Amino acid sequence: MKILCSGDLHLGRYPTRLPAGVPRESASVSERWLAMVELAIEEGAEVVALSGDLVDRANRYFEAFGPLEEGLRRLGEAEIVTVAVAGNHDFDVLPRLARSLPAERFRLLGEGGQWEREVVRTRRGEELEVHGWSFPAEQFVGDPLQGYGLEADEGCPVLGLAHCEVDGWRSRYGPVSARALRARPPGFWLLGHIHQPRLLEEAGAGALLYPGTPQPLDPGEPGPHGVWWVETEEDRFGEPEFRPLATVRYEAVDVDVDGAQTVGEVQARLLDAVTEERDQTMEGAGVRPSWLSIHARLTGRTRVAQRAIEAEVSAHIGDLELGGEARCRVDRIDIATLPRLELEELARGGDATGHLAELLLRLDSSLPEVAALVEKSGAAAERVVRSSAYLPLRARAAGAPPLPEAAEVLRRQAYRLLEELVVQKENV
């Protein structure tokens, strides 16, 4: 039995930060959903399994209904059964949509947070047992496995469907243990909520699969996206196979500008790195992206000042767009370079420049006073995060960086300040 697996479609959404002039509909999630439907039909899927958040909460009912209904109609005409659960975005919308569709086309399991069992019979007469749980509200801090009392028939493969966060103990979106999932009857779990594709395998245990969004929605979802195939043989599941389907790709690229002497050299290395990333992205089988959005990070030690890079490189990233089979643009540049400075020589001075240079030399040591300074910096960052000015963002804030990251932030800011002081002294 061939099963096409997907989830987190967010019908009604459109990818962000694409090159100017990209036709909105051609990059839409709805267009990729219909492409997924055609793939299922062409390659002989018998079941399509969807792990929630089919509909985006911001767009809800009307915008999602047309594409969803059309896709399910095509699947039904091809005698392909679609099974799904609802996620936190569509916990209230998807049940209403399901009631508007013929039951033989679309089966929603676990409405209201109650585990439900369904035995699906395919067009070839094979059976698949599905255990499903849908989100009961926009947030759910309890364990979804509480109340799981389902048993499985012998000799039939059992698929688990749930929208949850594996091992996310403080999550508000169905925190659940991977070990507990594997202790339940399903031999394969298709999960939703995490937008990055993620296959969790353990020897001697059933696989847990987050299929990821079939079309990435923003730069926080880098890398290839698509759908997954899994086949059954008797009561066992085979190895899941990823199939690229997205027409949009986001990538983060580190650009080494170590030793660069001029802004022109920095620009050349950036262009080379972007071109190489585009060419590598276009290799491989499956659907190739039509649009590539890159977040570049410049690293290394260089005599080119950060202010010069900001003025001559970052300020003009809108002009850097490559053509070819995929249109490619740099959406953002982070400057993480460090200046080429003689710290030992600068530290001999008794002015602010000397004190900063001495601090940088000591930051890599394990001296107690350095650890105390890093801890003090981390505490200061935490106070900023918790200040009333950032109250609207606090629900999404991750808090202050942990100490190792705080030390790196302190180092980079100290280098940047030192670079400015040296430039000022040279211009006096």
Image (cartoon, rainbow, N blue to C red):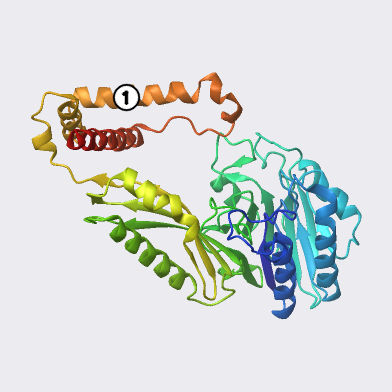
Residue 287 position (above or below residue 112): below
Residue drawn 82% across the image and 47% down it: 93
x and y percentages locating residue 337 in the rendered image = 30, 47
x and y percentages locating residue 161 in the rendered image = 69, 54
Q: In which quarter of the image is residue 420?
A: top left
In what quadrant of the picture does the C terminus appear? top left
Residue 127 position (above or below residue 84): below
Residue picked out by circle 1: 375
Q: Quadrant of residue 197?
A: bottom right
Q: Is residue 248 left or right of residue 283?
A: right
At numbered mark 1, what does the secondary structure look like: helix, strand or loop?
helix
Return the residue nearer the eye: 298 or 91: 298
Give neighbour class at mark 1: few <14, some 14-19, many 20+ (Cα, 10 Å).
Answer: some
In what quadrant of the picture does the N terminus appear? bottom right
Q: Residue furthest front?
A: 428
Residue drawn 38% across the image and 47% down it: 310
Residue drawn 49% across the image and 76% down it: 284
Q: Which amino acid does label 1 sit on?
A: Glu
